Image (tube, rainbow, N blue to C red):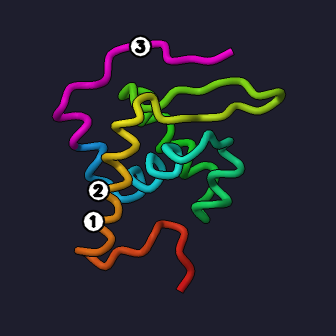
Amino acid sequence: MSSCKDTRVAEQSVVNKLLSDPMRLEILSALSMDDWTVKDLAKYLRISRRQLNRQIAVLKKAGLLCWRKAGESIKYYVRDAEIGQMSTLLFSWWSEQMAIQPVGAVN
């Protein structure tokens, strides 16, 4: 079972706002590489599941993420490969330009 309920992606201005957040960019970038459960993605990004769930809800509402059932788990993935590629590029650029460490980075 999977879900991509609304086939429309949010208006461009909404997408631009979502993609201006480094945490969301990093989440989308990771999800563009592979499907993840919240537990595994939170561990990979070194953020709390609660924090990740909030961001996933926002991205799903905007139509950028979908999910599929994998046994007992739910795995999330980026709805459109181009969104994933764009997120990865933006996050890389932002990290370099602003000296932003990945969300879960440990100093």
The answer to whether the residues at label 1 and label 2 have Cβ atoms under 8 Å apart is yes
Q: Report the residue marked by disc 3.
A: 6
Residue 74, x across and y down, in percent: 70, 31
Amino acid tagged 1: Trp
Q: Secondary structure at mark 1?
A: helix
Q: Secondary structure at mark 3?
A: loop
Q: Is residue 13 magenta?
A: yes
Residue 38, x across and y down, in percent: 65, 44
Q: Report the residue marked by disc 1.
A: 93
CA–CA distance in space, label 3 to label 2: 25 Å
Image vertical order of residue 52 relative to residue 2, above or below: below
Residue in the image at 48% along x and 50% along y = 27
Residue in the image at 31% along x and 79% along y = 99
Residue in the image at 76% along x and 28% along y = 70
Q: Mark 2 Cα within 10 Å, few/some/many (few <14, many 20+)?
A: some
Viewer-nearest of discs 3 and 2 = 2
